[in-house]
Image: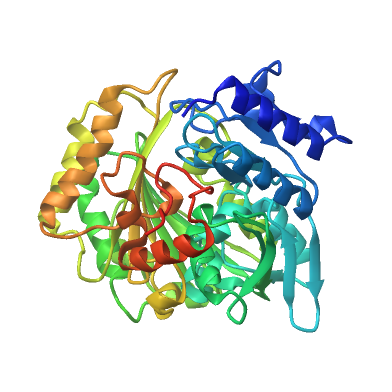
């Protein structure tokens, strides 16, 4: 999606007018070190050159930027933390106008309602600290501190507290948003409720949120963090332990205070997570005994919420995935109570981990427990479509220097082995682990909510101004 010289000239004239008093707030492809200083791609395997990257400081300037882009016939995408797996926050293809929200750092806490208001450029690590230092509050969110709240709270936002409090977007009560015609408005359950529905799960195709209002919860007073490291033997020998984990987490009455994940990687397998309660309560679950495996066990109690969140960021996979750009590939599948992996499929999968030519030592297969409160919320309440998900699998591989075709094939075959073990299932995918190779990404991300989203898109953005390769299209 290239731009003609006349289009580029018109855009630059318009944007230079918006930022006449702050020329450093806008960058163009002709600027020195444009990719390094302004574009900052996350996935180095997907090159993208935006028409411009702007860093406004007010919602009014965001509105003017959108109008400049529309006048030049260009697409627009917001960037909060910049962690889109396919660089969709850069437009996902050449020629978009990128609105970097890094300067939107407002934070306020209403100590009567315990509603927090904050800017959409706030990173999760900063948000956690600001919530805690203003009344020892918290919301459910993911574990990577470098991720931006703007994308996280509008895609889903799944994390260790989600089984108790829902996804991050379920905390959102109201937003300030810039629409495709430049209008600045607010959306909530009582105002622009159809738009609010779309923004809570598919916002990249509907507008630029500049401010969130969220309800908060008391930060957990103490937590038990556990990890079972299994590093000896072939991956195929871990199959029984994974089967035991799946058997534990499929129980509908499983304590919602338990968060858990399984990570398989080159060095072995780790089952880890957090129990939001006391050591005695955790012990009563008999989690370790039920996993029944020769494992190195690490269990410790923390009575400081910020320490618990910092502990999550020390996760072995996050240290590599985290905020470091690189060439990588990722896929995901959503599982429900009715689509558990049969034992034969588990055996085939773990045998494949041993035999596959992966093309890199930097690979991870991550099974994340969901369920709980996330499942309680009706599908019709938000655009987030996987309300029946019990757990997700995310596969992730980083190229050493470059990403090899055999590495992509490795991840594709993981999905194929799982899908072949459960034939006839229409697996969904999590939009937070965006996968540009999906044959119908919109359906995989938004499922039965997609037709409604397309109708709302027609009302608010009929020209598809807010666009990336897999965003919602007008009906």
Percent coordinates x, y for residue 89 in the rendering? 55, 42
Q: Position of residue 159 (x, y in %)?
A: 50, 61
Observer-nearest residue: 150 or 19? 19
The residue closer to the viewer here, 377 or 128, is 377
- 414 vs 38, left or right, is left
The residue positioned 40% from the left and 24% from the top of the image is: 399
Q: Is residue 134 something one can see in this rendering?
A: no
Q: Tell me where residue 262 appears, x and y as whole percent.
A: 37, 53
In front of the other: 462 or 129: 462
Residue 8 coordinates in the image, percent (x, y): 63, 26
Q: Residue at x 52, y 66 (%)?
A: 200
| Image quadrant in which the C terminus is located | bottom left
Rendered residue at 43%/50% (across/down): 471
Q: How is the image coloured?
A: rainbow
Numbered circles on residues, count: 0
Name of the residue lying farthest toward the right: 21
Compare residues 28 and 355 and report the one nearer the observer.
28
At x 30%, y 28%, the residue is 407
- Residue 117 position by quadrant: bottom right
Q: Quadrant of residue 181?
A: bottom right
352, above or below 444, in the image: above
Is there any visible trace of residue 339 in the rendered image?
A: yes
């Amino acid at each position: 999606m290239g731009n003609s010289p006349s289009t580029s000239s018109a855009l630059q004239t318009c944007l230079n007018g918006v930022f006449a008093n702050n020329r450093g707030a806008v960058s163009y492809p002709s600027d020195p070190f444009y990719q390094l200083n302004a574009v900052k791609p996350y996935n180095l395997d997907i090159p993208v050159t935006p028409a411009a990257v702007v860093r406004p400081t007010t919602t009014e300037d965001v509105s003017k930027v959108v109008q400049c882009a529309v006048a030049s016939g260009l697409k627009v995408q917001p960037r909060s933390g910049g962690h889109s797996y396919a660089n969709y926050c850069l437009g996902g293809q050449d020629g978009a106008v990128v609105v970097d929200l890094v300067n939107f750092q407002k934070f306020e806490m209403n100590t009567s309602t315990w509603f927090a208001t904050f800017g959409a450029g706030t990173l999760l690590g900063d948000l956690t600290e600001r919530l805690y230092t203003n009344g020892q509050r918290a919301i459910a969110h993911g574990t990577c501190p470098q991720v931006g709240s703007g994308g996280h709270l509008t895609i889903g936002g799944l994390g260790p507290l989600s089984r108790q409090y829902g996804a991050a977007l379920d905390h959102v009560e109201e937003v300030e948003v810039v629409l495709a015609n430049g209008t600045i408005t607010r959306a909530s359950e009582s105002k622009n409720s159809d738009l609010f529905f779309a923004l809570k799960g598919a916002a990249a195709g509907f507008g630029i949120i500049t401010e969130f209002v969220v309800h908060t919860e008391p930060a957990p007073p103490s937590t038990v963090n556990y990890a079972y490291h299994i590093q000896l033997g072939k991956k195929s020998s871990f199959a029984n332990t994974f089967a035991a984990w799946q058997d534990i987490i499929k129980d509908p009455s499983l304590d919602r205070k338990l968060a858990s994940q399984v990570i398989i990687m080159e060095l072995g397998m780790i089952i880890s997570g957090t129990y939001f309660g006391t050591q005695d309560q955790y012990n009563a679950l008999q989690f370790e005994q039920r996993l029944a495996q020769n494992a190195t066990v690490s269990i410790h109690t923390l009575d400081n919420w910020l320490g618990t969140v910092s502990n999550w960021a020390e996760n072995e996979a996050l240290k590599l995935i985290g905020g470091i750009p690189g060439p990588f590939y990722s896929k995901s599948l959503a599982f429900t109570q009715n689509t558990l992996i049969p034992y034969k499929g588990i055996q085939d999968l773990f045998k494949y981990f041993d035999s596959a030519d992966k093309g890199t030592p930097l690979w991870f297969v991550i099974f994340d427990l969901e369920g709980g409160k996330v499942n309680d919320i009706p599908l019709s309440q938000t655009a987030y479509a996987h309300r029946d998900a019990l757990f997700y699998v995310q596969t992730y591989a980083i190229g050493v220097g470059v990403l090899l075709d055999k590495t992509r094939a490795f991840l594709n075959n993981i999905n194929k082995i799982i899908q072949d073990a459960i034939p006839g299932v229409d697996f969904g995918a999590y939009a937070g682990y965006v996968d540009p190779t999906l044959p119908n990404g919109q359906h995989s991300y938004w499922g039965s909510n997609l037709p409604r989203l397309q109708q709302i898109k027609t009302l608010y953005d009929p020209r598809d101004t807010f666009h990336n390769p897999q965003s919602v299209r007008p009906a």
